[in-house]
Image (tube, helix red, strand yellow):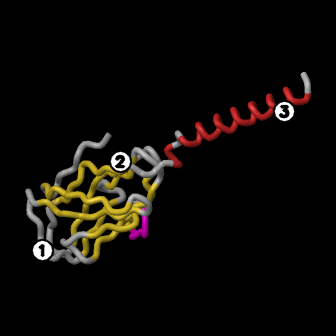
């Protein structure tokens, strides 16, 4: 091989390797924008007008994100709660994994509505806005269900 053939061959191999690497990384869900949807959203009928819980699943078919806050006309103080070692505590955010789910469910992580402005009844719908670090705002409705309602878990 002469010097020119070697140079052209080396350039072609470098270009092929660069294209292969960039092609692999662009398919990764971690690098793509989050694609969020909400399902199974409900609120058990509150026992009193002081507080209520909210439960739902955020499905993500894209890159990772964070739930940073929740707002609702039902309450001026809506909190995100994490449950660890059977203790509930307010947190500032929750991770929504790439190509995964964030499950807010009874006995686990959930939304807490403090100081309700009114008391929703079975059959009502409670409008909420979920605020995410990357995806922005996602609107959802919680179906008000019986106090004992607990959907089947997978």
Between the residue at mark 2 and the residue at mark 3, the CA separation in whole angstroms equals: 49 Å
Tag shown at residue 7: 3
Residue at which label 1 appears: 118
Tag shown at residue 59: 2
In the orientation shown, which residue stands out farthest toward the right?
A: 2
Q: What residue do we see at 28% from left, 67% from top?
A: 112
Q: Earlier in the sequence, mark 2 or mark 3?
A: 3
Q: Crowding near pointer 3: few (<14 within 10 Å), some, many (20+)? A: few
* Mark nearer the viewer, 2 or 3: 3
Between the residue at mark 2 and the residue at mark 1, the CA separation in whole angstroms equals: 30 Å
Location of residue 87 (image quadrant): bottom left
Tag shown at residue 63: none
Q: Nearer the viewer, residue 78 or 62?
A: 62
Q: What residue do we see at 32% from left, 40% from top?
A: 154
Span of residues in magenta: 89-94
Q: Earlier in the sequence, mark 2 or mark 1?
A: 2
Queried whether the magenta region covers residue 14, the answer comes back as no
Q: Is mark 3 on a helix, strand or loop?
A: helix
Q: What residue do we see at 23% from left, 46% from top?
A: 151
Q: Earlier in the sequence, mark 1 or mark 3?
A: 3
* Mark nearer the viewer, 2 or 1: 2
Q: Crowding near pointer 1: few (<14 within 10 Å), some, many (20+)? A: few
């Amino acid at each position: 091989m002469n010097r020119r053939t070697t140079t052209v061959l080396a350039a072609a191999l470098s270009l092929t390797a660069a294209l292969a690497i960039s092609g692999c990384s662009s398919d990764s869900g971690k690098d793509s924008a989050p694609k969020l949807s909400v399902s199974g959203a409900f609120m058990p009928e509150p026992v009193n007008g002081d507080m209520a819980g909210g439960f739902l699943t955020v499905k993500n078919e894209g890159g990772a994100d964070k739930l940073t806050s929740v707002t609702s006309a039902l309450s001026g103080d809506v909190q995100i709660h994490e449950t660890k070692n059977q203790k509930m505590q307010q947190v500032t955010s929750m991770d929504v994994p790439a190509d995964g789910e964030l499950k807010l469910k009874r006995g686990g992580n959930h939304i807490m509505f403090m100081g309700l402005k009114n008391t929703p009844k079975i059959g009502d719908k409670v409008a909420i806005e979920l605020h995410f670090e990357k995806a922005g705002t996602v609107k959802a409705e919680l179906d008000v269900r019986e106090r004992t309602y607990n959907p089947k878990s997978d």
